[in-house]
Amino acid sequence: MRTRICFTAPRVRASAITGVAVAIAFVLSTPSSVAGPPTDALYPPRFERANAGARVEAPDYVARVHAAFTPANRRYARVRQGLALFEPLWGLVFVSLLLFTRASARIRDVARRMFRRRYGRVFAYLVVAGLVAFAFHLPLAAFRDYWWEHRFGLSNQSALVWFTDELKALALELAFLGGTGLVALALWGIEAAGRRWWLWLACGVLPVATAAVLLQPLVFEPAFNRFEPLGDAGLDRRILALAARAGIPARHVFQVDRSRQTRTINAYVSGFGPSQRIVLWDTTLRSLSADEILFVMGHEMGHYKLHHLWKGILLAWMLSFGLLFVGARLMSRALRRFGAAWGIGSLGDEAALPLIAGVLGALLVAAAPALNGWSRRVEHEADAFGLEATRLNDAAARAFEKLGEMNRSDPDPPPALRLLLYTHPPLLDRVRFALTYRPWEQGLPGRYFKGAPPGDEGRNSRSRDARPRRAPRAPGSRTGDAASNCRRSAVSHHSRTTSRRVRRSDGVTSRTKYTPGLARWPAPSARSHWRK
């Protein structure tokens, strides 16, 4: 239920009902991952030849990133990678146990004795099965997200607070999937649509995914953390100037108190339309310098301006047609073969939810390399946007260095792990790209950022109070000799002819009056004009 495109991959909370409602939960995950092209293809082709001579390793940053990946960090990363590979298998084991022990059928029978209508039966089934799934996955989640994080000093949570957050996640998932009737509606559609149920279900993916993304920053995230505007006035001004050049409303930039849970650093984009926002963790604000944070904000603004969230939703929607088409065939065959042993008569049966979850989960794992490749590509585009918007190459390299050191990230994972697990380009690739990507030095336009270059906002930043004004007339200026009166008359006539409506360079039409020989009034800064 965490639909985000992040500066770095977030530590995703284990779903408490993974084995119950993947058919709908799939809708909620905007893939931010996928095996992308080889490392060289991460460099935009337009500038590849121009940067070929400059693409050399910077010994300071590259060597420091390697040095920061200590044996302890390597052990931490390898265990996390192993758990990420093991978790889908663990989910399939749970689904198999529910089906072959007829536990799913027993839970359905209990739900049917409690409620006659489908909505009540499905909601009761989800609550009971969700609690069973929560208990089954709890040991793995506790080891991965609590014990292992504390073992390496990356978590600030007590056991009670961590367990409370897990229960909150379970409650929110049950409310969204069961309380709203989404799963009940899906099962009704499977029964009513016959053999083409997969087509109707795929059509419903788009509105459900859109609603989930819209509600995430408004309902789901505030249940775990407090969000507020940035508190640093100086940094806020710089971010406002960058946001104005990028055409992003500043009200959409927040900081969140993630230090309550973790010591790692991150930033992300979530929501869309009125709920879309760029969020900085407070740990990021404390750990990075102002220039480094500015590049991070440029990266997140790239996701915002390049519409990566919408592209992710559309990708998930298109992918759902293929997954549900293939999944429908596999589910029908499994039901014909094992339906009697499982105590399940049709796919519209509540007890068939683990089957739907297992099949779609396996297909998603098979599609992961392609999805991860797409995600790495959009993350690379956001890196390029941030560099073009800020031109802070050295700060970007330092930010990636600190990111890897504080998060204990593997800077150069094996190709197979990169293909299967990595939603972002490896750290060393991002550092090298940050140090070499400088198209503006060769007079080439940016591929992604189309605003004014850094520094332009400062040339038009004077306030209206600083406008040049005509000197006041001396007392008795209406009297004097004929020559003085003639000169005053000429100046007055010139002032009258220039006091007319003028379209300024920033597109605002106003009435302008100035004294000859003085500079024209400067246009308001982009920030003050946006604030209007």
Image (cartoon, rainbow, N blue to C red):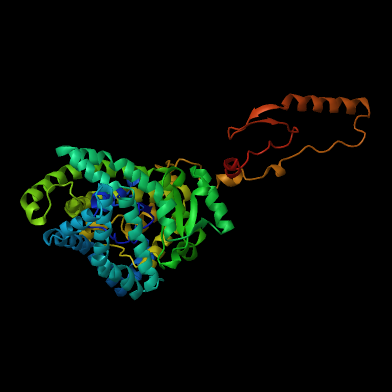
Query: Which quarter of the rendered picture does the C terminus lie within?
Result: top right
* Between 459 and 181, the one nearer to me in the picture: 181
Query: Image point 54% across, 49% down: which residue?
Result: 240
The relative height of residue 97 versus residue 328 in the rendered view (above or below) is below
Residue 241 position, x and y percent, is 55, 48
User: Does 254 sit left or right of 361 as displayed?
Assistant: right
* Between 466 and 166, the one nearer to me in the picture: 166
* Between 515 and 234, the one nearer to me in the picture: 234
Query: Image point 25% across, 55% down: which residue?
Result: 114
User: Does 214 sit left or right of 451 as displayed?
Assistant: left
Query: Which quarter of the rendered picture does the N terminus lie within?
Result: bottom left
Is residue 372 visible in this depiction of the protein? no
Residue 266 position, x and y percent, is 41, 60
Residue 207 position, x and y percent, is 33, 41
Q: Quadrant of residue 155?
A: bottom left
Is residue 244 visible in this depiction of the protein? yes
Residue 363 position, x and y percent, is 18, 50
Query: Image point 17% across, 49% down: which residue?
Result: 349
The extreme left residue here reads 337
Query: Image point 24% across, 62% down: which residue?
Result: 133
Q: Quadrant of residue 136?
A: bottom left
User: Does 267 sit left or right of 79 as displayed?
Assistant: right
* Between 306 and 14, the one nearer to me in the picture: 14
Q: Quadrant of residue 342?
A: bottom left
